[in-house]
Structure formats: C-alpha cells, structure tokens
Image (cartoon, rainbow, N blue to C red):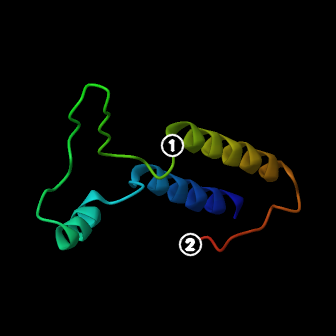
Amino acid sequence: IVTYTLGNYLLNVYSAFLSPNFDPALEMDDEEDDEDEEGLILPVHEDDEFKLFVRKLPNFKFWHTATRATLLELFCTILEFSDISVFWPI
C-alpha cells in the first residue's frame, strides 16, 4: 500500500508541476468584460519580462518533494508495521 500511496502522491505533484499558476484564457475573458479586446500585453521595453507560463509548482520544489516522498517510501517499506497486504487485482 505504501507504493500505491507514493504513486498517487507523485501523480498529484506531477500534475501540479505541469499545470499553470493561472489560466491566461480565463484572465483574457475577465479583461474582455472590463475593457476593450486588448488580449495579452507584450513587453514594451527591454527591461520588461513576459512570462506566459508560470508553473503552479516550481521546478526545484517539484524535485525536492518527489525525492523526499521517494526516500520516505523506501524507509517505510523496510518497516514491518507498514507492510500492509493489498488485494492483488487492484
């Protein structure tokens, strides 16, 4: 059961890593209601930075969380009390 839990947790962390922090399409819909149809605003000066895709979970935090969960799972597989049998067709 420890491995199933790790798989579900890593899938959740991976989906948070791949999903954007905000959805530009939803923000564009809100702006269209408030203002004229301008769309996304691109940088005008060289100092401005345009980031279209900002992740919900940053890269370092993703790897740190996944590594910590994997090491905890490896430690839990050694212990006897965490050896819970699972019905095999699952």
Write the residue at 22% across / 62% down: 28
Q: Horizontal and vertical percent for residue 30?
A: 25, 70
Q: Residue at the spot x=47%, y=53% of the render?
A: 56
* Furthest-left residue in this view: 37
In the figure, is residue 28 to the left or right of 9? left
Say whether disc 1 or disc 2 marks the residue closer to the N-terminus. 1
Name the residue rendered at 67%, 45% in the picture. Answer: 70
Check if mark 1's residue and mark 2's residue have beta carbons within 8 Å: no
Q: Which of marks 1 and 2 is in front?
A: 1
Mark carried by residue 58: 1
Q: Position of residue 89 (x, y in %)?
A: 56, 73
- Rendered view: 25 above or below 50: below
Q: In this view, does 3 lie above or below 44?
A: below
Residue type at the position of mark 1: Pro
Q: Quadrant of residue 24?
A: bottom left
Badge 2: few (under 14), some or many (20 or more) residues near its Cα, within 10 Å? few
- The amino acid type of the residue labelled 2 equals Ile
Q: Quadrant of the N terminus?
A: bottom right
Seen in the image, is 18 located left or right of residue 37? right
Q: Tell me the element at label 2.
A: loop
